[in-house]
Image (cartoon, rainbow, N blue to C red):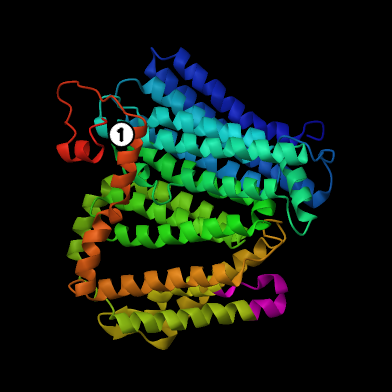
């Protein structure tokens, strides 16, 4: 093993996926053979990524193995790269196995397999990129190959409308990316990510070109992550096969957070870029979380949940909490993949829940009291761990957000009565350790920001979290209140933001829809929204 570079082994993952895509198209007349190729490819890539990660870990611990890597190496072999590569190959293995049964009897399955394997290859390339040009190329190719999956049913107007909107938003993001490459290349003369990190750590004030590059990169991530007001396509891609939704929500849309973590030295050195991420992400998280509570469709509710989670992930990156953003990516990806792939069992689950006794929703004051207790638990845990290691210190805004997340545990109401103190405190204390321990675990992984976020951004984050919690708890406790009724109309409509963006989209680039007989027509209300541009 000492004669082979671990980066070369890891790079074989996207190569094998691309070769598998070609093989699936070559064997397209034999659908079963195409699926066997896909199964074999994702199984081998999963094993290879695990072995490469273990190999790299052994090298780091033992201090032996491959020669030291040069700063201009194109392939990254750090913790972040292998964490994302392992996530992508695992999701690929699960989605391919699920897709074979889900698409049984559907036409053009080899075309689906080829697009799926190509998407996995491009996403893997992004995860392994140590060069900004390679990262941008892989990110753009991921979007283009995903477009083929979103339009798997070319005779469905709603699928084409959503994919068309995503296509335009992604191209705008890639214009921002191209500008980032140009500005950084002209200023530093290199696009190597380690070299960029070294250059931005030295001066106290960066040149205007690098500051503009950071802001444009933040804008590209905002566009790619389906933040308000360009979020509509993420909510409306439900016409695509369910495995495609799982891949999109669990993997592809999370690449924006990964890019921010990879470029953390540059982003943390530009307050304007941090402010853009925190403000847009905070607004999106609050609005999307409220809209999600008004939806009945399982997949649509999950889509709004993804929109909110991406907003919160951008807030984490804007505050410089990159190690927690990595945890968010991994946890959200696994959860959302399972949620989409298990969406078909919702009817059976609902029937089972109806047999159980209804749980009483705690009153709003009791929920607020639980939030205060939970915040105190997290703050106490962070203080206690900081006495062991100063690296365990958490920003006060994160303490507030984490405490609010634990409020349901601390409120601890069952059947209308407060649980015994020991039954309430034990799970609350245990869960309060998780954000602190993860922060401490990755404190030495060099994912954190060298410059802390400003108090203004921390205050904005805390206010967003408190407002969201207060409104949700009040509406849940009294859904017939005047506030709940007024909010419902606006939240159910998503504040009418997507309608305005859709009108602009189709005026800028009209779309010709299929006229095949038997296809549900687009309602006249949608045609009016788009100004007849369809």
By secondary structure, the bulk of the magenta-drawn segment is best described as helix
**For this view, does 125 lie left or right of residue 293?**
right
x then y, percent, for residue 89: 54, 38
Relative to 120, say whether 107 is above or below: above
In the rendered image, the quadrant that contains the C terminus is top left
x then y, percent, for residue 98: 38, 36
Local packing at callout 1 (Cα closer than 10 Å; few below 14, some 14-19, many 20+) is many
Regarding residue 418, the answer to whether it shows in the image is yes
Question: Residue 403: within the magenta?
Answer: no
x then y, percent, for residue 417: 28, 85
Residue placed furthest toward the bottom: 421
Q: Which residue is mark 1?
A: 161
x 33%, y 83%: residue: 366
Secondary element type, mark 1: helix
Regarding residue 129, the answer to whether it shows in the image is no
x 50%, y 69%: residue: 460
Q: Foreground residue, 278 or 71?
A: 278
Q: Which residues are magenta?
A: 384-396
């Amino acid at each position: 093993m000492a004669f082979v570079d671990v980066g070369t082994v890891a790079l074989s993952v996207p190569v094998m996926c691309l070769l598998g895509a070609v093989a699936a198209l070559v064997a397209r007349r034999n659908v079963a053979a195409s699926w066997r190729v896909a199964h074999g490819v994702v199984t081998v890539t999963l094993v290879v990524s695990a072995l490469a990660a273990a190999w790299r870990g052994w090298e780091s611990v033992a201090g032996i193995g491959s020669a030291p890597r040069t700063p201009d190496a194109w392939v990254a072999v750090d913790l972040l790269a292998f964490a994302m590569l392992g996530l992508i190959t695992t999701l690929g293995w699960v989605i391919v196995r699920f897709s074979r049964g889900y698409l049984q009897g559907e036409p053009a399955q080899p075309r689906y397999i080829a697009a799926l394997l190509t998407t996995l290859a491009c996403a893997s390339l992004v995860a392994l990129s140590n060069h900004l040009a390679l990262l941008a190329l892989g990110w753009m190719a991921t979007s283009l190959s995903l477009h083929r999956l979103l339009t798997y049913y070319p005779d469905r107007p709603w699928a084409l409308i959503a994919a068309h909107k995503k296509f335009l938003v992604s191209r705008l993001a890639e214009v921002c990316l191209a500008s980032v490459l140009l500005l950084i290349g002209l200023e530093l003369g290199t696009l190597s990510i380690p070299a960029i990190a070294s250059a931005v750590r030295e001066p106290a004030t960066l040149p205007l070109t690098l500051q503009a590059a950071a802001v444009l990169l933040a804008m590209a991530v905002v566009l790619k992550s389906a933040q308000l007001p360009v979020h509509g396509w993420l909510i409306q891609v439900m016409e695509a096969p369910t495995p495609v939704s799982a891949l999109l929500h669990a993997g592809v849309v999370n690449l924006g957070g990964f890019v921010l973590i990879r470029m953390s030295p540059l982003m943390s050195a530009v307050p304007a870029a941090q402010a853009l991420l925190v403000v847009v992400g905070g607004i999106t998280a609050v609005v999307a979380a409220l809209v999600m509570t008004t939806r009945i469709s399982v997949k649509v509710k999950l889509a709004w949940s993804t929109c909110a989670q991406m907003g919160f992930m951008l807030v984490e990156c804007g505050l410089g909490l990159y190690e927690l953003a990595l945890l968010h990516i991994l946890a959200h990806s696994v959860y959302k993949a399972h949620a989409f792939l298990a969406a078909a069992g919702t009817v059976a689950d609902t029937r089972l829940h109806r047999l159980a006794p209804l749980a009483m929703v705690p009153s709003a004051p009791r929920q607020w009291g639980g939030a205060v207790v939970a915040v105190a638990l997290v703050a106490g845990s962070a203080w206690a761990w900081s006495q062991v290691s100063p690296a365990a210190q958490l920003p006060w805004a994160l303490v507030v957000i984490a405490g609010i997340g634990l409020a349901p545990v601390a409120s601890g109401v069952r059947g209308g009565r407060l649980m015994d103190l020991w039954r309430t405190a034990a799970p609350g204390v245990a869960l309060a350790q998780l954000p602190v321990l993860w922060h401490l675990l990755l404190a030495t992984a060099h994912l954190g920001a060298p410059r802390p976020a400003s108090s203004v951004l921390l205050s904005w984050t805390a206010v967003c979290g408190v407002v969201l919690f207060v409104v949700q708890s009040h509406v849940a406790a009294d859904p017939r209140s005047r506030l709940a009724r007024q909010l419902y109309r606006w939240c159910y409509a998503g504040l009418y933001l997507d309608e305005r963006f859709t009108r602009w989209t189709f005026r800028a680039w009209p779309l010709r829809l299929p006229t095949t007989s038997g296809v549900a027509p687009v309602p006249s209300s949608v045609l009016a929204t788009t100004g007849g541009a369809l």
